[in-house]
Amino acid sequence: MSDQSFEMPQDVRVPVPTGGEGPVVFAPAKLRKQLLAITQPPEPEPALPLDRHKTVEAGLAAFQQLAADRDNLKRELLAVREELTRRDVRLEEMNRLTNLIESRINTALIQRDAAVSEAARYDGLFVAIDAIIRKVIPASPLTPSLQGRPDEGPAG
């Protein structure tokens, strides 16, 4: 070995890791860019100007108001649909009751017509019996009304 000392040239620099870079600085340039892009946090986005920030806040407030209105309208729609269902059930019940009443009325009309028909038959029978009685039973002082008109009853 010689006694000569080795001096490093001034223009050559060896990268020394600083901060959070670590051994990435020793990687080839192309790989170093990729590794730095992955390992370093993204740069913060620039802050919005005040007028745009207010516009964004107003848009978010309008969206939230619309969402709240939509939810309220959904609740109201549900309540209206429930009320409509209740009214449909009530209407159906009333229709059944109306049909029952109409059926009873029709039955009563049929019974009345039958009773009127039967009464007319009996009336005819009674007229015939009256005519027979007038011919068979002679007029007597006890039955003065039989000598009168046939539709008159006993005098009294």
Image (cartoon, helix red, strand yellow):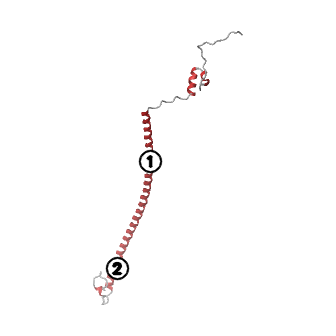
In this view, 136 is above or below 87: below
Q: Nearer the viewer, residue 127 or 70?
A: 70
* Residue 152: % across, % down: 29, 82
* Residue 123: % across, % down: 34, 77
In this view, 4 is above or below 23: above
Quadrant containing the N terminus is: top right
In this view, 9 is above or below 58: above
Query: Which numbered circle lies on residue 152?
Result: none
Judged by depth in the image, the label closer to the viewer, 2 or 1, is 1
Q: Which residue is mark 1?
A: 72
In the rendered image, which quarter is residue 84 located in?
A: bottom left
Q: Amino acid at mark 1?
A: Asn
Few, some or many residues within 10 Å of mark 2 (<14, 14–19, 20+):
few
Few, some or many residues within 10 Å of mark 1 (<14, 14–19, 20+):
few
Left or right of residue 118, residue 22 in this image:
right
Asked if marks 2 and 1 touch (Cβ < 8 Å), the reply is: no
Q: Residue at x 42, y 63 (%)?
A: 97
Q: Which residue is mark 2?
A: 126
SS for callout 1: helix
Q: Nearer the viewer, residue 44 or 18?
A: 18
